[in-house]
Image: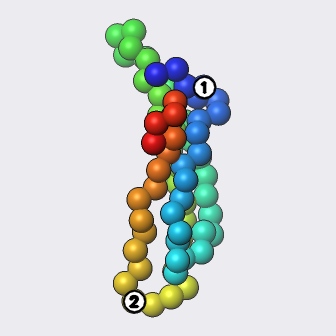
């Protein structure tokens, strides 16, 4: 895959009913091992519930090179 690691794709968050996002951050890492390059983008979200009971976080998706 050919991805610009300086501008990784943003994940699409599902409805976070019952939660408020109180913080978020991103980081990236590039590794070269035996000539093989790998990249990693890490997205962190801090959620605070505002409702009681069972709260569900649906899957998060990312579109990369036209694929979800």
35, 10: nearer the viewer: 10
Residue ID for mark 1:
4
Q: In this view, does 15 lie above or below 50?
A: above
User: Residue at coordinates 59% horizontally, 74% vertically from top-left?
Assistant: 20
Tag 1: Cα neighbours inside 10 Å, few (<14), some, or many (≥20)?
few
Q: Quick check: can you spot residue 45?
A: yes
Tell me the number on the disc at residue 53.
Answer: 2
User: Residue at coordinates 46% horizontally, 36% vertically from top-left?
Assistant: 67
Q: Is residue 49 above or below residue 30?
A: below
Q: In the picture, residue 45 is in which quadrant?
A: bottom right
Query: Residue extending furthest bottom?
Result: 52
Among the two numbered marks 2 and 1 on one chain, the one whose residue lies closer to the N terminus: 1
17, 43: nearer the viewer: 17
Q: Quick check: can you spot residue 29?
A: no
Q: The C terminus appears in which quarter of the rendering? A: top left
Q: In the picture, residue 24 is in which quadrant?
A: bottom right
User: Residue at coordinates 59% horizontally, 45% vertically from top-left?
Assistant: 10
* Spot occupied by residue 66 in the image (x, y as percentages of width and height): 51, 34
**CB-based contact (under 8 Å), mark 2 and mark 1:** no
């Amino acid at each position: 895959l050919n991805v610009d690691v300086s501008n990784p794709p943003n994940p699409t968050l599902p409805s976070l009913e019952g939660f408020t996002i109180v913080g978020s951050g991103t980081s990236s890492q590039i590794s070269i091992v035996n000539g093989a390059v790998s990249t990693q983008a890490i997205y962190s979200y801090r959620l605070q519930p505002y409702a009681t009971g069972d709260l569900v976080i649906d899957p998060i998706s990312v579109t990369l090179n036209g694929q979800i």
